[in-house]
Amino acid sequence: MAKNKLKRFREINSFPNVIQPQDKYPVSDYFLKGNWSAGHFGNSFPIILELGCGKGEYALELARTSPEKNFIGIDIKGERLWKGAKTALEEGLTNLAFLRIQAERINHFFGPDEVSGIWLTFPDPQPRKPRRKKRLTSPAFLDRYQRILVKGSPIHLKTDNKDLFEYTLEVVRENNHKLLTYTDDLYNKGTNINEPLVKEIQTYYEKIYLSQNLPIHYLKFLLNT
């Protein structure tokens, strides 16, 4: 197992679709900030992020079905990113990249009006109350997103954690963000959810949750401006 892990780390270091900044905690902005489409992808397509992307199941399928957009999967775990990045290279998905950073550092890497959508797929629910500010839907994180999102760009949350789902609904409502759609049981009650691929794409962990008959929660919202 350890040998395979080391092999993957060596491989990922050579992948052209994986960006691994040398400084894990950057104090200055990354050189591609504000210029990802032209500087990395070589086009002017809109950029969609998947935060906490894991093996990149969502980013991969979105990139396959939307060649007119660029996608970036973000995660701090290199071993997870290896799977998605390798698959993307094998399939020739030039509109997909992976960025190995902590989500807290996102504003060092993306500029104002550079991102056209964010997917949060089964993020760490941070169940302990003192760590709620670490949740990817906390007011602190929504402020980070607001600084990089094009006005009117959606944020999607998909989770098995009821507390995180209800917490996010509360944050959205208390801060007068615009709730577009939501359901506490996507596969059994979500007949009104018409978001493309939200049911068709299932992550590794999602399949485990579904096999245990756990409901999957989903919501989509816009930040107020």
Image: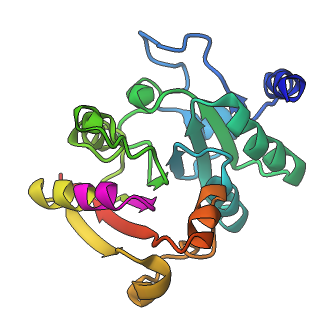
As rendered, which of 31 and 155 lies closer to the eye?
Answer: 155
As rendered, which of 157 and 118 lies closer to the eye?
Answer: 157
Residue 165 highlighted magenta (yes or no): yes
Q: How is the image coloured?
A: rainbow
As rendered, which of 202 and 45 lies closer to the eye?
Answer: 202
Q: Quadrant of residue 99?
A: top right
From the top left corner, tell me how far across and down residue 181 is, in percent: 32, 75
Residue 30 highlighted magenta (yes or no): no
Q: Is residue 33 above or below residue 160?
A: above
Count of numbered circles in the view:
0
The residue sitting at the front extreme is 212
Q: Is residue 42 visible?
A: no
Q: Which residues are magenta?
A: 156-167
From the top left corner, tell me how far across and down residue 94 is, in percent: 76, 47
Does residue 78 appear to the left or right of 3 in the view shown?
left
Q: Residue at x 66, y 49 (%)?
A: 56
From the top left corner, tell me how far across and down residue 19 is, in percent: 66, 27
From the top left corner, tell me how far across and down residue 8 is, in percent: 83, 29
Quarter of the figure that contains the N terminus: top right
Q: Residue at x 54, y 76 (%)?
A: 196
Q: Is residue 63 above or below residue 135?
A: below
Does residue 193 appear to the left or right of 63 in the view shown?
left
